[in-house]
């Protein structure tokens, strides 16, 4: 497989994902051109939707690695995990992360002018979350090549990292303690 999304339904999933991403980008651009009084709230809504999508993948992908680690190399189950992992990472997580970053930076600039300590702490945590995203992406490629350098315990621990970062980020955004 080498990390491919497969053929047939995989190509359809990628096509649907690209269409959805194009629709979201077009909608955001249209909102910015139209510039309604509620633009900030619309952008914030799309940003939150992107965050939810990204976090769903960040929490699910390490669980897939736990199960993939226990499967036999070359088995049908292992090959299925490869497809699931690649699609989740490429079709859902990465586009959601990109949308979250772009809109989040716009919101930070427009709403706060990057002038709040809590905002910089949140951005630092999102950078760390992006680093975890990259680590998981490298793991997707390693599993696709049947390299299994980590055991299930490692993936169970890694599964907690996005949760801790998410809690910190939510507290920064909602409570704004600094």
Image (spheres, rainbow, N blue to C red):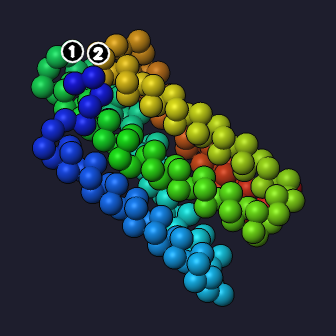
What residue lies at 61% left-to-right and 61% top-to-bottom?
Answer: 103
Element class at badge 1: loop
Question: Mark 2 and mark 1: span between their CA atoms?
Answer: 6 Å
Q: Quadrant of residue 35?
A: bottom right
Measuring from the top left, give residue 143's x and y in whole percent: 33, 21
Number of marks:
2
In the rendered structure, find residue 103 and report the number of the disc placed on it.
none
Residue labelled with disc 1: 73
User: Are the residues at dot 2 and dot 1 in contact (C-beta closer than 8 Å)?
Assistant: yes
Outermost residue to the front? 33
Residue at 32 percent of width and 54 percent of height: 17
Which mark's residue is nearer the viewer, 2 or 1? Answer: 2
* Up-down relation of residue 73 to residue 46 (above or below): above
Where residue 23 appears, x then y in whole percent? 39, 67
Q: 75 left or right of 173?
A: left
Q: Residue at x 46, y 69 (%)?
A: 26
Mark 2 Cα within 10 Å, few/some/many (few <14, many 20+)? some
Please say if 23 is above or below 74: below
Q: Residue furthest bottom?
A: 37
Which of marks 1 and 2 precedes in the sequence? 1
Foreground of the two, 95 or 82: 95
Q: Nearer the viewer, residue 70 or 116?
A: 116
Residue 43 in view:
yes
Judge left or right: residue 43 versus residue 111.
left
On the rendered image, what quadrant is the C terminus found in?
bottom right
Task: Decide if residue 41 is in sight here.
Answer: no
Foreground residue, 169 or 136?
Answer: 136
On the image, numbered disc 2 is attached to which residue?
146
Identify the image quadrant of residue 127. Answer: top right
């Amino acid at each position: 497989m080498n990390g491919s999304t497969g053929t047939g339904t995989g190509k359809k999933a990628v096509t649907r994902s690209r269409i959805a991403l194009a629709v979201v980008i077009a909608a955001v651009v249209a909102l910015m051109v139209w510039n309604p009084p509620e633009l900030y709230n619309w952008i914030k809504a799309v940003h939150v939707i992107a965050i939810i999508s990204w976090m769903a993948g960040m929490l699910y992908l390490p669980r897939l690695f736990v199960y993939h680690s226990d499967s036999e190399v070359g088995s049908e189950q292992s090959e299925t995990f490869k497809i699931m992992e690649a699609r989740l990472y490429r079709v859902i997580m990465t586009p959601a992360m990109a949308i979250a970053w772009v809109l989040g930076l716009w919101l930070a600039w427009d709403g706060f002018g990057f002038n709040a300590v809590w905002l910089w702490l949140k951005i630092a945590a999102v950078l760390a979350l992006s680093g975890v995203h990259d680590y998981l992406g490298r793991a997707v490629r390693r599993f696709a090549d049947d390299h299994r350098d980590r055991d299930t315990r490692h993936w169970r621990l890694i599964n907690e990292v996005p949760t801790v970062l998410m809690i910190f980020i939510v507290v920064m955004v909602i409570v704004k303690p600094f």
